[in-house]
Image (cartoon, rainbow, N blue to C red):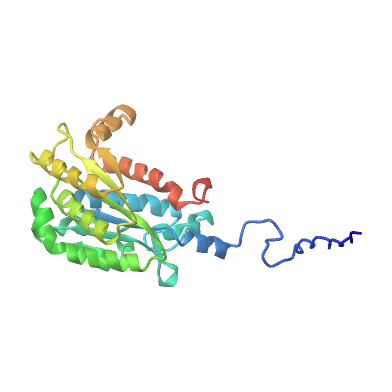
Amino acid sequence: LCSVIPISPPLPPPPSSSPLRNPSGRPPPKRERERAAEMREILHIQGGQCGNQIGAKFWEVICDEHGIDPTGKYAGDSELQLERINVYYNEASGGRYVPRAVLMDLEPGTMDSVRSGPFGQIFRPDNYVFGQSGAGNNWAKGHYTEGAELIDSVLDVVRKEAENCDCLQGFQVCHSLGGGTGSGMGTLLISKIREEYPDRMMLTFSVFPSPKVSDTVVEPYNATLSVHQLVENADECMVLDNEALYDICFRTLKLSTPSFGDLNHLISATMSGVTCCLRFPGQLNS
């Protein structure tokens, strides 16, 4: 004889009002979305005359896209503008948004022009780091002498900003390879950051010199020495070619005499497009 063992019925599913579920099926509340977005900060660094001019233009463009006015206050009209605002901005007291940016140069001139520009007051005053001597378009001065003296001050500011992040995603560096500061000191900073934060992303926006659009005779040397450093230490390098930018201004935009302001505007539009999926919610980073 075999005995029949009764099988207990399956447990009923949890009620729809369970606290583990979102009964409406709607997206999670704003605070939860903010918590998810808090983990993606990027630290922006701009160096040298070219890097600072391009960087200043980049911040003008993304402040406009995120609805941030020149005082750092939000003046936009969409919740999407603030959803991932902390990727590039720190929230300060009084509801102000401050760019997570470090500005460096070996001479004060460019810093003064950035500070007196339309969005100059939005940056944290302590994040302006500059020397007095300049690099004289000399890569070795930026990398080994004048730049090496200033690099610790820059790294202190970088560390301070990195420590304020919940989960630092990486760094982006804006510089040119033709001068002395952006190329020499820029690559020195990149190698130091790589030593200290080996597991963080390193992206550079590097303006390469061109023989047709040349400022100084030593540009090829500065660029050659810099490229070696970038190959070693950068994860991703956006190559910005002055000659190609001039061609776009002539052929596409039909400008008869393009200025550096026009070129910088093109670069800032490119940088805005490249970083768009980091700054706004979407399928790529949901």
| 40 left or right of 225 in image | right
The percent position of residue 205, horizontal first and vertical second, equals 28, 46
Q: Residue at x 43, y 61 (%)?
A: 86
Q: Position of residue 177 (x, y in %)?
A: 18, 44
Q: Is residue 116 visible?
A: no
Residue name at image x 24 percent, y 68 percent: 156
Which quadrant of the view contains residue 117? bottom left
Q: Residue at x 77, y 64 (%)?
A: 15
In the rendered view, does 22 fall on the left or right side of 250? right
Residue 169 place in picture, x, y as percent: 38, 57
The image quarter containing residue 149 is bottom left
Which of 35 and 265 lies nearest the eye of the viewer? 35
Residue at far top of view: 251
| Visible residue check, residue 278 | yes
The answer to whether residue 73 is left or right of residue 49 is: right
- Quadrant assignment for the N terminus: bottom right
Name the residue rendered at 17%, 45% in the picture: 226
- The furthest residue to the front: 1
How many labels were placed on the picture? 0
Rendered position, 15 above or below 256: below
Q: Position of residue 228 (x, y in %)?
A: 18, 44
Q: Residue furthest bottom?
A: 93
